[in-house]
Amino acid sequence: MARKAKVARKTKETDIKIAINLDGKGNYKINTSIPFVDHMLSLMSKHGNIDLDAQAKGDIEVDYHHLMEDIGIVLGEAINKALGRKLRIRRYGESMTPMDESLAQVVIDLSGRPYLVYKVRTPRGGAQIQSLGVSLFEDFFRALSNNAGMNLHIILQYGRDPHHIFEAIFKGFGRALRSAVEIQTKTKGVPSTKGTL
């Protein structure tokens, strides 16, 4: 059975609906009201072979923070729901992903214990892409990690262009997630000596 989930969240600040298929083919339909975020989530979906439908709107006339964080919350909830009992998953995933002059390392443990290590420094003058403050990506990934129950490490090895930096990160996140959710036929139950994740 395909591991699928749909999650919706509506507040006075945002309205978000996400559907995910962890056993998909990398198909995506994304409209978050922030074109650069649409691009990043499309890359995550395509390179992770994960089907993703993400529709989101929010009070971006105030700023992008509420919407960015809430997209992370809903995506994390969808991943966690789609994983179900996490039977026979690999659990760990890692990628080292280049994009031109940038190189990003992403490591995932679907342990059920959320923790984010985020070591990403953009070069001087790279604090924004269009009008989006790139510091908000840390808030996005923290919300995702907390709600997915995911131990997530994102380390930028080096990079110059902010677009390339985050493209490497999101492609790498998709690839690492793809590896972590893969079914291991020789594994019985969950990959933990505790018997639960």
Image: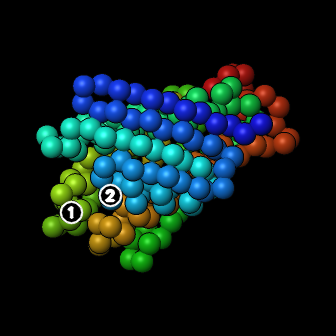
Do we see residue 16 in this rendering?
yes
Q: Residue at (68%, 26%) from the top-left corner? A: 85
Q: Earlier in the sequence, mark 1 or mark 2?
A: 2
| Among the 4 quarters of the image, the one containing residue 66 | top left
Residue 150 position within the rendered picture, expressed as x and y whole percent measured from the top left: 51, 35
Left or right of residue 176, residue 89 in this image: right
Looking at the rendered image, the disc whose residue lies closer to the viewer, 1 or 2, is 2
Q: Residue furthest bottom?
A: 100
What's the distance in space between the residues labelled 1 and 2, CA to CA?
10 Å
Residue 137 position within the rendered picture, expressed as x and y whole percent measured from the top left: 32, 48
Q: Amino acid at mark 2?
A: Pro
Left or right of residue 122, residue 107 in this image: right
| 158, 11: nearer the viewer | 11
**Pointer 2 residue:** 35
Element at badge 1?
Answer: loop
Left or right of residue 4, residue 143 in this image: left
Q: Residue at (24%, 25%) from the top-left corner? A: 12
Q: Amino acid at mark 1?
A: Gln
**Mark 2 surroundings: few (<14), some (14-19) or many (≥20) residues within 10 A:** few
Left or right of residue 131, residue 2 in this image: right
Q: Residue furthest right?
A: 186
In this rendering, the answer to whether 116 lies above or below 113 is below
**Pointer 1 residue:** 130
The answer to the question of whether label 1 and label 2 lie on touching residues, with beta carbons closer than 8 A, is: yes
Q: Residue at (62%, 43%) from the top-left corner? A: 21
Do we see residue 146 in this rendering?
no
Q: How is the image coloured?
A: rainbow
In this rendering, the answer to whether 189 lies above or below 23 is above
Q: Residue at (44%, 64%) from the top-left corner? A: 168
